[in-house]
Image (spheres, coloured by chain):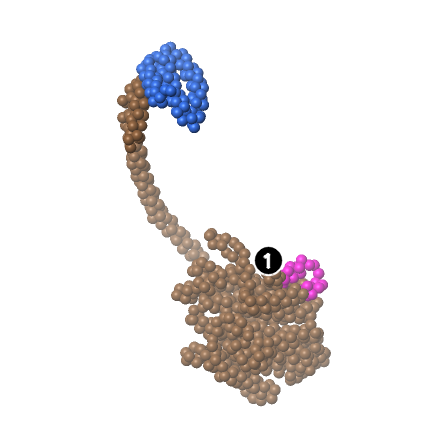
Amino acid sequence: MNFLETITSITLLSPLIGALILFFRKENLYSDKIATTLIGLSVIGNLCVFYYTWNYSPIVLQDEWFLLGQHSFKATLKIDQLSSMLLTMVSIVSLFVHIFSSAYMQGDPKYKKYFTLLGLFTFSMFGVLVSDNLIMLYLFWELVGFCSYMLIGFWREKNEAVKAAKKAFVLNRIGDAGFMVAIITLYSTFGTVSIEALSTEVDQLQILPLYIVGIGVTMAAMGKSAQLPLSVWLPDAMQGPTPVSALIHAATMVAAGIYLLARCFFVLPVEIQLLIGIIGGLTAFLGAFSALSQNDIKRILAYSTISQLGYMMIGIGVGDPEASVFHLTTHAFFKAGLFLGAGSIIHSMHQVSCDICKGFDPQDIRWMGNLKQYMPKTFIGFSVCLAGLMGLPFTSGFLSKDAILSSLLVKASTGSWEWIFLALLGFTAAAFTAFYSIRLLYQVFFGKLGIANHKVCKDCLVLPKEVNVRMTMPVIVLGTFTLWFFYALSPFETSHTWLQNGLSLATVDTGSVHTLGLFLSIGVVALGAGGAYLIYFKDAFASLKKQLKSSSLHKLSYNFAYLDKGYKLGVKTTLFTANKLENIPHADEYFVGVTIHTSEFVRGFDDKVVDFFVKLFAVVNVVFGHMLAWFDKVIVDGVVTLLTKVLSIFGDVFRKPQGERTQSMIAWSIFLLLIMVLVLWFI
Amino acid sequence: MIPFSYYMLGSAFLFCIGLAIALTKRSAIVALMGVELMLNAANVNLVAFSHRDPSFGEGTAFSIFVIVIAAAEVCVALALIIRLFQHFRSVDLHKVNTLKEE
């Protein structure tokens, strides 16, 4: 094992080592320090790996895994540019989440377990990113799902948390089933599960298996990346601790789906790409639309994540996975910053309230306000991240979102109506994003402190305080990563940033619509943000606002288009039908009767038809055996006997004339010997 | 100096006498004598060749080996004849024909 491989192994394994150390320790003390140190180690290692793969060549570690028949499966770790970039992103976000958690989770009785799970979560995400073998990827994929289940339901004494965890798990399983079908189909069609081998072997002519694979992989991504209609788990996943939400929404869980699609982009037929685009467009639109009316700060962010993931799906759909991955990376940083900022806000809002204040919810933005004054550091970090989410110029979010939207415009400019429709959805969602971001900013940091206006609560009010440095620092640093200069020198250069150039994925040439794209995206952001500014900061259109609030559109938005209700209705209908069936008297007897008749029929069939064929088969076999025996006796044995007879006749011919006496035999031998000598002499 | 062809003719004559005795005499002991004569005819040949071309110096040594082995062979043959006699109460070769096919 050379130096590079050692570094890589340490990098990938250190979160797992951290988790194991914590698992075998008894007390909570120093748990955060151990976990954070090991993640820090991983960050450094990942930066080295990133530097190496970006400048030299991909790192490949390979070993025999298991043998199935003649086919040997190899456990292959392959770190190319895409993997190493996402590895770096995941480890950095994970590091900040660790630092933040050490303050946020302080005093929790399950402190140690929390950090164990965080480490395992990070490790399994590493595994997803580096596996080249699809079966191995699937294992890590499941591990990511399991860790998210454990972390969403971390406070398991809360009923909602347990429900949310179960929901996330079940909805992910639907997608995972699709992934499994895709893997099986790939193996049966191409005889290999290695992505690298597949990328050279995939033949676009074998169209039917590719459709199955495409749909399977898309389903997997829909589950993990919370696309419609499987996206209902993501808002509920807010029941977990807030830093975990940051990790799930930014780096680990939801990134896996987009990563899988970007990785397997070469197997997706054009029609499946369109399907992905449509799913993404609807998700982006509906997510942004639902975020407009939420009051829970974390739910707003959750719906915004759904909507941004929709953008990434659009990017895959238009054939520009490069832009998707770019958006994934930039989104990871600012979304982690937003969630950690939200965590800080919730943390300090917790201290505001007191016992007599009934109905207070520290996550409800209506209770907040004017926090700019009390929490200036968090305000700075949070608002920069929010600017990234909106896609304001000079932020990374602008660069990456514009890259996707430009590619979408290129497709739409070909004139096909699906892509025009998708472009409309995409730009509307961008306007909505700007709108709810400004609303969130106003409700939380400007205006008046909501709790101070309450009749009862204002009596025992303690003014919110800035949280400690371990919580502000990650938000501000992640906010810094939102600025454009990490990704491109020019803040308006959206298609050829060094990250995109280095990734070497498929992309779309957006040169023709570059300017148009820029103006359109700045325009819709200005429209959304301006509208929100007028409504909230300037208090304009008050009557319209009131009207909208009571309209059914508002309800539709607040309930995420009643998707949840739809699922519930489905389950209830099933249960109802089952109950009804149970209430019909003697229903079971009919079943028994039918079963008995069926088995009678099957038995008769067995006796008459199946047995007849079996007997026929036996008779044919015996006849054939006799024929074989005759052949053996007469032909094979006959030939052998004939041979011996011929030989004995030859023997008699030479033996008989020699007479009976010994001396005549000797005379004959000498005579024959002489003849032989003579013959040899004259030849 | 006796010419070389005389040796050859002499030994051929001796061989023929030995062969005739071995094929015609009914007594096993006399037939054995004929065999001995044939052996010694070969010995005469060996010595004669060695004498004619002395570069093959081993001819005489080889004939001495033949004489020694012939002595041993005579022992074995006489022992066989004794067993023959004990079995058939005779040394007549015409009576020793029980191996033949009926």
Tell me the quarter of the picture where residue A417 sits.
bottom left
Colour seen for chain B: blue
Q: Residue at x 31, y 15 (%)?
A: B24
Chain letter of disc 1 in the image: A
Q: What residue sits 40% from the left and 21% below the top?
A: B43
**For residue A530, side relative to residue A646 (left or right):** right
Q: Which colour is chain A painted? A: brown
Q: Which residue is depicted at the point 51% across and 84% down?
A: A519
Q: Give how far across and how far down residue A610 sits, in percent.
A: 35, 48
Q: Nearer the viewer, residue A21 or B95?
A: B95
Q: Residue furthest front?
A: B1
Name the spot of residue A593 as percent of width and height, x first: 41, 54
Q: Quadrant of residue A541?
A: bottom right
Q: Is residue A230 left or right of residue A669?
A: right
Q: Position of residue A55 (x, y in %)?
A: 56, 69
Mark 1, residue position: A1
Q: How many residues crowd mark 1 within 10 Å: few (<14), some (14–19), many (20+)? A: few
The quadrant the N terminus of chain A occupies is bottom right
Q: Amino acid at mark 1?
A: Met
Residue A566 percent location from the top left of the image:
50, 71
Location of residue A540 (image quadrant): bottom right
Q: Secondary structure at mark 1?
A: loop
Which residues make up the magenta segment?
A: A14-35
Q: How many numbered marks are there?
A: 1
Q: Is residue A23 magenta?
A: yes
